[in-house]
Image (cartoon, rainbow, N blue to C red):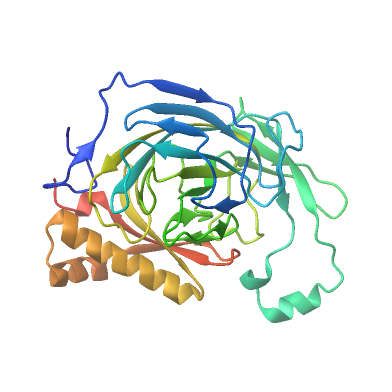
C-alpha cells in the first residue's frame, strides 16, 4: 500500500496491486445509453490492473465506421472494480486516448444556449447538419475542407479526450448518457485527456465504471453541441481509496487539481465546483476553512466545460505549484 500522490493523503488507505498487475484487453460488443447499476458487468478488474479497450462514437459508429449502437453517447463497460464499496473513492488514471479511424464529425451551428436569442432568430431556416473532419493521426491533425458554405478550410491539432467517464449513480438512479452529475458522466471537459487522474465517488458495489464519447478535440464549452466525435483506443488503470468522501468529480494533471460541478443553471455548477474544491483543500492539504478560502480568492481559476448538456459543467482549478508539498 502507498499514498496516491496529489490526492492528499494522510491516513488514507489506497488499495492497489503490485506494479506487475495484469492487463485486460477488452473489445466491447454491447453498449449502454444510461449510467446505471442495472447493467451487468462487462469485465471484472482489480485495483492496479490495466485495461486496454475501445469506445465508439457518440452516434454509435465503431472504429470501422460500422453502426453498432444507438446514440447518444453509447458507453463501453461497465467495469466492476473488485473491492469497491459505497463510500469509497475510485481513482481512474487515463493512460492513453488515441483516435482509431480516419474520420470524425461535428455539428456546424452554435448551440441555442451558447448565443443570444436574437442570433437564433437571425439564422431561422438555416439547416443544422453534421460536417466531416479528416483525422490524420500521423500528422496529429483534424481537417475540415472548404466547400459550399464552409470557408475557409480549417486544420486543428488533435487533443484527444473523453466526453464521458462515470460510475453508477447513487440512489439506484439510471441517468442518460447525455447528462453529467456527481457520478461523472457526460462532463464534456476538454481537459479530460491522457495523463489525467479522475476521482469519482463509489455508490454501488464494484463502482461500475463506464467510458465513451471520444472527441478528437473539443473547444471549451462545447458550443456547437459536439466535439469532433470519433472512436478511440483507450487504456486506463484504477485504484481505490477506502472510505473516502468525494462529492463531485476531482481531476489532477501535471499542473492543476480540478473539480467538475454540474447543474442548471451554470451558477449552480460553479457553486458545486467551488464548494468541493474548498472541501478538498481542507481534507487533504491541511488548510483551515478560512485559509482555503483566502487561497481560492486569489488563485482559483475557472473553465466552462459544457453549456449544451442537460446539466452544464464548470471546472474550478488550482495550480499545484501554489499548494503545499505533500
- Is residue 64 visible from the viewing direction of this image? yes
Q: 258 left or right of 117?
A: left
Whether residue 307 is situated above or below residue 240 in the rendered picture: below
Residue at 40% from the left image edge and 27% from the top image edge = 50
Provide residue 235's location: percent of width, then percent of height: 47, 30
Q: Is residue 245 left or right of residue 131?
A: left
Quadrant for residue 64, please give it: top right
Up the image or down, 230 lies above or below 233; here it is: below
Q: Position of residue 293 (x, y in %)?
A: 21, 71
In the image, is residue 282 above or below residue 198? Answer: below
Q: Nearer the viewer, residue 21 or 311?
A: 21
Task: Give the residue at x 27% y 22%.
Answer: 19
Q: Between residue 39 and residue 283, name the one nearer to us.
A: 39
The percent position of residue 7, horizontal first and vertical second, equals 24, 47
Task: Please tell me which residue is depicted at 12% across the width and 47% down the height of the picture.
Answer: 10
Quadrant of the frame with the C terminus: top left
Q: Nearer the viewer, residue 266 or 178?
A: 178
Give the image location of residue 220, x and y in percent: 53, 57
Amino acid at each position: 500500500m502507498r499514498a496516491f500522490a496529489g490526492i492528499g493523503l494522510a491516513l488514507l488507505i489506497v488499495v492497489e496491486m503490485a506494479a506487475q498487475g495484469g492487463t485486460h484487453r477488452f473489445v466491447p460488443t454491447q453498449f449502454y445509453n444510461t449510467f446505471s447499476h442495472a447493467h451487468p458487468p462487462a469485465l471484472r478488474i482489480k485495483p492496479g490492473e490495466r485495461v486496454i479497450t475501445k469506445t465508439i462514437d457518440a452516434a454509435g459508429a465503431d472504429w470501422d465506421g460500422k453502426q453498432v449502437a444507438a446514440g447518444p453517447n453509447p458507453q463501453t463497460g461497465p467495469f466492476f472494480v473488485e473491492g469497491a464499496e459505497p463510500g469509497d473513492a475510485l481513482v481512474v488514471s487515463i493512460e492513453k486516448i488515441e483516435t482509431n479511424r480516419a474520420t470524425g464529425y461535428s455539428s456546424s451551428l452554435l448551440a441555442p444556449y451558447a448565443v443570444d436569442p436574437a442570433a437564433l432568430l437571425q439564422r431561422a431556416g438555416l439547416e443544422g447538419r453534421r460536417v466531416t473532419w479528416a483525422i490524420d493521426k500521423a500528422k496529429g491533425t483534424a481537417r475540415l475542407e472548404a466547400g459550399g458554405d464552409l470557408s475557409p478550410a480549417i486544420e486543428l491539432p488533435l487533443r484527444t479526450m473523453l466526453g464521458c467517464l462515470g460510475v453508477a449513480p447513487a440512489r439506484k438512479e439510471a441517468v442518460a448518457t447525455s447528462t453529467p452529475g456527481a457520478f461523472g458522466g457526460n462532463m464534456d471537459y476538454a481537459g479530460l485527456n491522457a495523463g489525467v487522474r479522475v476521482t469519482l465517488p463509489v455508490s454501488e458495489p464494484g463502482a461500475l465504471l463506464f467510458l465513451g464519447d471520444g472527441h478528437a478535440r473539443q473547444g471549451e464549452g462545447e458550443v456547437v453541441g459536439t466535439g469532433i466525435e470519433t472512436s478511440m483506443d483507450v487504456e486506463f488503470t484504477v485504484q481505490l481509496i477506502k472510505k473516502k468522501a468525494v462529492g463531485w468529480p476531482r481531476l489532477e494533471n501535471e499542473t492543476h487539481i480540478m473539480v467538475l460541478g454540474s447543474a442548471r443553471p451554470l451558477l449552480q455548477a460553479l457553486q458545486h465546483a467551488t464548494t468541493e474544491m474548498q472541501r478538498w483543500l481542507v481534507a487533504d492539504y491541511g488548510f483551515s476553512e478560512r485559509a482555503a478560502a483566502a487561497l481560492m480568492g486569489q488563485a482559483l481559476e475557472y473553465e466552462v466545460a459544457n453549456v449544451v448538456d442537460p446539466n452544464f459543467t464548470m471546472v474550478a482549478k488550482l495550480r499545484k505549484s501554489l499548494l503545499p508539498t505533500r
